[in-house]
Image (spheres, grey):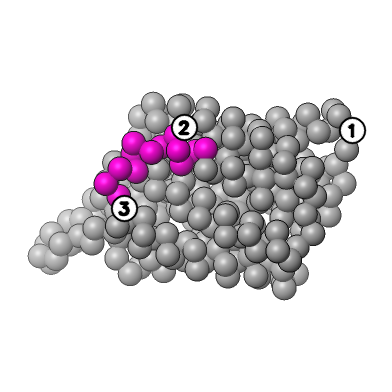
Amino acid sequence: MTWLEQLAVFGAGIAAGGINTIVGSGTLLTFPVLLAFGLPPVTANVSNTIGLVPGSISGVHGYRRELAGQRDRLVRLGTASLLGGITGAVLLLVLPADAFKAIVPILIILALVLVVVQPRLAGWVKRRRDNDGAPAPAHGGSVLFAAIFATGVYGGYFGAAQGVLLIGLLGVFVHDDIQRLNGVKNALALIVNAVSALIFIAVADVDWRAAVLIALGSIIGGQLGARLGRRMPPVALRAVIVVVGVIAVIRLMAS
């Protein structure tokens, strides 16, 4: 890569780190840039995943106040993300890319629907539980665990809009402030990205120059995204999620 191309990758890393912390879908910024500069698709995906891990750590650190008191929730759901991330990373290495790409836009659209209807759907779920006399599961119950695992599989395989899926699911099944759930989303995405990165480092072809440039940029972006995202009211945060998700679907279907 020329120095201008390297600067573009670094800039994409900043943008991706910020948008991953606020919403998710940062991969849709960095992945096309790497492809445009000549990296093979799998190498670009692998290098991008590794590069975004430091940004995910930066974002989680930025949301550390919102994560306070959620240890049990993180352990339970983090286990699902860990198992899903391992599964998805292995699938990336053994399956053809087209096998999973076809369903990605559908998953993102589903996530956007969940985000939009989340307040009403969460209220309906709560009313049903109140009528049945059953307390709401503190961590979302077995259905959420399975859904987080499936999202981890997706995240380990490709990862674009993983955060949109996570925040949509958490908003429906867990009755808590959306900023606290956004902190959980960032932690779960970090787990998936980190375990995938470890597998890729061990067995896959990595373009380390691209990975380092994205890593440096995403660290900066993660801090900027945390500062902005933590100040956004719930309605504004949902609006950003929907806009980013729609852009993600358009870009994936056009590729």
Among the two numbered marks 2 and 1 on one chain, the one whose residue lies closer to the N terminus:
1
Q: Is residue 98 left or right of residue 160?
A: right
Marks 2 and 1, how far apart at CA:
31 Å
Is residue 245 something one can see in this rendering?
A: no
Q: Residue furthest bottom?
A: 94
Q: Identify which residue, 16 or 58, lies in the foreground.
A: 58
- Residue for point 73% across, 37% down: 213
- Residue for point 49% across, 38% down: 59
| Residue 60: x %, y % from top left | 46, 41
Instruction: Let me know if residue 187 is in the magenta part.
Output: no
| Residue 25: x %, y % from top left | 58, 44
Q: Residues within 10 Å of mark 1 (few under 14, many from 20)?
A: few
Instruction: Let me know if residue 65 is in the magenta part.
Output: yes
Q: Which residue is mark 2?
A: 226
Foreground tag (3 vs 1)? 3
Is residue 136 something one can see in this rendering?
A: yes
Marks 3 and 2, how far apart at CA:
20 Å
Q: Which mark is residue 71?
A: 3
| Residue 49: x %, y % from top left | 65, 51
- Residue for point 81% across, 47% down: 35
| Dot 1 amino acid type | Thr
Q: Which mark is residue 86?
A: none
| Dot 2 amino acid type | Ala
Q: Which residue is mark 1?
A: 2
Q: Which residues are magenta?
A: 58-70
